[in-house]
Amino acid sequence: MLAKRIIPCLDVKDGRVVKGTNFEGLRDMADPVEMAHFYNTSGADELVFYDITASVEGRNLFTDILRRVASEIFIPLTVGGGIRTLDDFDRVLKCGADKVSVNSGAIADPSIIGAAAKKYGDQCVVLSMDVKRVDGQFRLFAKGGREDTGIDAMDWAARGVAAGAGEIVLNSIDTDGVKNGFDLEMLDELASRVSVPIIASGGAGNMEHFAELFTHPGIDAGLAASIFHSKQVDIKELKRFLRGKGIEMRV
Amino acid sequence: MIAIVDYGVGNLFSLSSSLKALGLETEVTRDAEKLRAADRIILPGVGAFGDARAKLDDTGLVPVLLKEAERKPFLGICLGMQLLFDRSFEYGEHAGLGLVPGQVVDLHDDLEDKTLKVPHMGWNSLQIVKDDPLFKYFQDGEYVYYVHSFYARDCAASTLGTSRYGNVAVTGAVRCGNVWGTQFHPEKSGDAGLRLLKAFAEL
C-alpha cells in the first residue's frame, strides 16, 4: 500500500528559506539548496517550495534555485507561490517541478485549475488553501492568510477537485504556528468532501501529532516547516517512530 | 550514450538530470540517427495514452523504435511503459507498440475498495516477483514513486515486480527481451530509483 508521506516545506524569499509563525515575523533560516540536500538524505518523501518573493529579481533567483535543487535531488518537488497563469506553470515545470500549487491565483481566476489540469494532467495541479474558522464556518483566506474571501472552504475544495485539482494542501490558519497538533476536525471535514490526496499543514509540534494525524485514514501526508528546519523533529526518527506504530512509511 | 525520446510529452528535466547525476552521457532527441547510434533508449511519458500515442506517431519514429528495441536495451517509464503494451483502454481503445504482451486498463475498475484514491500516487513498495539484472542494486521491497490511474494487466509472463494497492497487484516493472518498463518513476524514486537507472545503464 501507499506509504504516508512526510513533507518539509521551504518558504523561499530572496534566495533564503524563511518561516514565520502565524504568517508573520519571518526569520531567516538557511540556504534552500543545502536544505534540500539535507532533507533528501534524511528521508523526506517530497519537498515543497513556496516562492514568497514579490520582486522580479527574487523570482528569477527562485527559479535558479529550483533548477539547482531539481538537478541534484530526485524526489518529487512541488512548487507554489505567485502562480497565476499557465506561463507560471510552464516556468516552474521547466525548472524541474513535478507539481505546481495554486492558492490566491486560483481564487483570483478559478479557471486556471481546469486549464492547467487539461494541459499538464490532474496529478500536476495542487490546490493549496489557507482556511480559518469564521462565524462557525470554514472560511477560505487569500493572500497568505491575510484576506477573508467569504468563500466556504469546503465548497471551494470540492469545486477545485471537480475542475481537475489532483491533490489538496490544507493549511489551517487556526493551528498554524501553534504547535498543538494538526487541525483534525477541519481535515476530517475536507476528507469527507473530496477523494483526492490530502496534505495536512499547520500545527505539527512533535512526533505524536503525526501519529495522531495518520490515524485519520483520509489523510495522506503531513507537511511542516519550522519543526523540521529547527531539527526539533528529525524526519528519520519520526518515520521510524511512525512505522513502530504500524503506519506505513518509506524508511 | 542513452537517448531519451523527445516527442513532446512530459517533463524530461528530472530524467536527464538523474542520468547526468550518475555520470552517464545522455541526449534528449527526436533524431532517428541519434536513436540508432545510442547504446540505450528511454521512452518517457506522462498524460493520456491516446494523446501520447498520436504525438509519438507524429514524430515518425515508431518504426525506428520498434527496430532499435530488438537491438539494444530499451526502457519505457510511466506512460512510456504503458505504450509498450498491445493496447490501452484509456478514453477509448488505442493500440500500443506491442513490444510487451498485455493491456492497460483503468485501475479504479479493478479496485474492490472504491474509497482507495486514484491516481495511485505516492511511494509504494516494489515486490520483486522475478529476479532480473535491472534489480542488481535494488532490494526487494524498496519504495518507488508512482503517479498513474491506469495500469498494465494480463502480462504475468513479463512482470518483474508489483506493488500492492488494495486487492490489486499493480504491475510495477516488466521485461520482454531487450525491453524493460517501469510504471513508477525511477527518476523520482530517490536513491533506490537512481540505482535502478544505474543498473539499466549497465545492461
Image: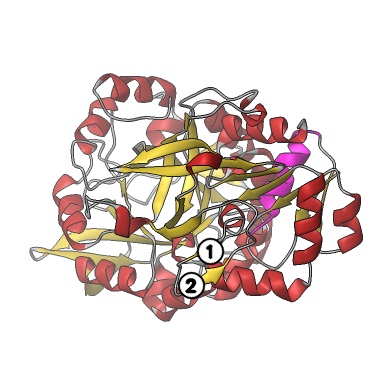
Please report the bounds of the magenta region as a residue range: B11-23
Q: Please state the chain letter of the residue tagged with numbered disc 2 in the rendered image.
A: B
- Give the left or right position of residue B186, taking residue A19 as reference: right
- Asked if the residues shown at circle 1 and circle 2 are in contact, with their CB atoms under 8 angstroms apart, the answer is yes
Q: CA distance from mark 1 to mark 2?
A: 7 Å
Q: Is residue A136 visible?
A: yes
Residue B58, image x, y percentages: 73, 76
Amino acid type, residue under disc 1 in the picture = Arg
Q: Mark 1 or 2 closer to N-term?
A: 1
SS at circle 2: loop
Relative to A173, does residue B95 appear above or below in the rendering? below
Q: Mark 2 = which residue?
A: B93
When asked about the image quadrant of residue B47, the answer is: bottom right
Q: Please state the chain letter of the residue tagged with numbered disc 1 in the rendered image.
A: B
In the rendered structure, does residue B107 fall within the stretch colored magenta? no
Residue B185, image x, y percentages: 57, 45
Q: Residue at x 40, y 45 (%)?
A: A20
Amino acid type, residue under disc 2 in the picture = Glu
Residue B57, image x, y percentages: 71, 73
User: What's the coloring here?
Assistant: secondary structure
- In-front residue for pair B10/A227: B10
Q: Mark 1 = which residue?
A: B87
